[in-house]
Image (spheres, grey):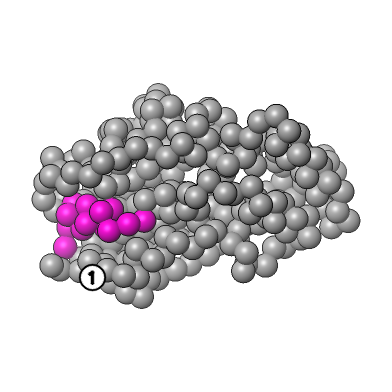
Amino acid sequence: MSTTAISFRLPKAASQGFQNASAYDTHRPSYPQEAVTSLLSALGLLGKQNTKILEIAAGTGKFTELLANREEGFNVIAVEPHGDMRGQLAGKGLKGVDVRDGHAGRLAVEDGEWADGYIAAQSFHWFANKETLKEAHRVLKKGRGLGAIWNIEDYNKPREWKATTTWEEKLNSWIYSISSDGQPRFRDGQWRGALEDQQLFALPLSEETVKWTVWLSEGALWSRINTLSQVAILEGSDREAAVRVFKEALQSPDVERNEKGEIALHGVTYFVWTKKLDS
């Protein structure tokens, strides 16, 4: 088992914000096959039979499911510290998946180099630090890769990215205005710092994006926004204000609806990867 011992406490934003694991699993998007295939190829895992993948902060298994359903027959250890999310994942009974409690800085896996790939889906920003990279380096085989992947809707993008529409930009500004819990998010870009100031993995990072559009009813769109941890915990007047901002944004003239009244939501799947350096 890991000998790395650091104290760990799940941040309140995560422990409370992701408490409704079922809603998260229902309303968060899956990942485009194009992006999944590209990432697996970049990590040298595409078409490789019976290889071992360590998935960190696997959540409810949105990405884990895609790994389990592939023809390669991957052996996946899915590590998740949040009890409700871990239970949701374990309940799926995914073939070839071993669900374990644990966190990125202290992995409940054997000592030595054994993993053919290390993947963090929609999560690396929560634990981008030196302890995480040391553990990843410990378990990965020589020359094998670490990858991180995110689905990023326009309303939850970094400020410097241009939104497709004004209504999504309005929601993006609102998301920034309520994000004062001090916890790092993808859009803050802080996660890059851990990877830039280290000598365990190759630099520069490789990166790729896949754009997508999904059509959602107004209710489904609001439910998806509520899977963001900082939105999920809003109560009272703060929640009332959130609903008001949401409805006002949907009055923008560039909201596109189809014949069913569904709204076009835009986003990208963004992923990066790097390879372990020999120590």
Image height of 214 relative to 14, above or below: below
Going 50% across and 32% down the picture, which residue do you hit?
A: 16
Q: Is residue 54 above or below residue 16?
A: below
10 Å crowding of disc 1: few (<14), some (14-19), many (20+):
few
Question: Residue 215 placed where, x, y %?
Answer: 72, 46
Looking at the rendered structure, the kind of residue marked 1 is Gln
Residue at 39% x, 33% y is 82
- Residue 4 appears at what percent x and percent y? 17, 47
Q: Secondary structure at mark 1?
A: loop
Q: Nearer the viewer, residue 198 or 92?
A: 198
Relative to 133, does residue 4 appear above or below in the rendering?
Answer: above
**Residue drawn where x is 38% and y is 37% of the image:** 10
Q: Position of residue 209 (x, y in %)?
A: 52, 64
Q: Position of 204 compared to 215: left or right? A: left
Can you tell which quarter of the image residue 131 is in?
bottom left
Q: Which of the two residues, 139 or 177, is positioned nearer the viewer here?
A: 177
Query: Can residue 234 be spotted in the picture?
Result: yes
The answer to whether 140 appears left or right of 97 in the picture is left
Q: Which residue is mark 1?
A: 199
Toward which corner of the image does residue 125 lie, by quadrant?
Answer: bottom left
Q: Residue at x 18, y 52 (%)?
A: 139
The dominant secondary structure in magenta is helix
Q: Is residue 255 magenta?
A: no
The magenta stretch spans which residues? 128-142
In the rendered view of the protein, which quadrant contains the C terminus?
bottom left
Q: Is residue 224 left or right of residue 218?
A: left
Q: Quadrant of the N terminus?
A: top left
Q: Position of residue 124 (x, y in %)?
A: 40, 52
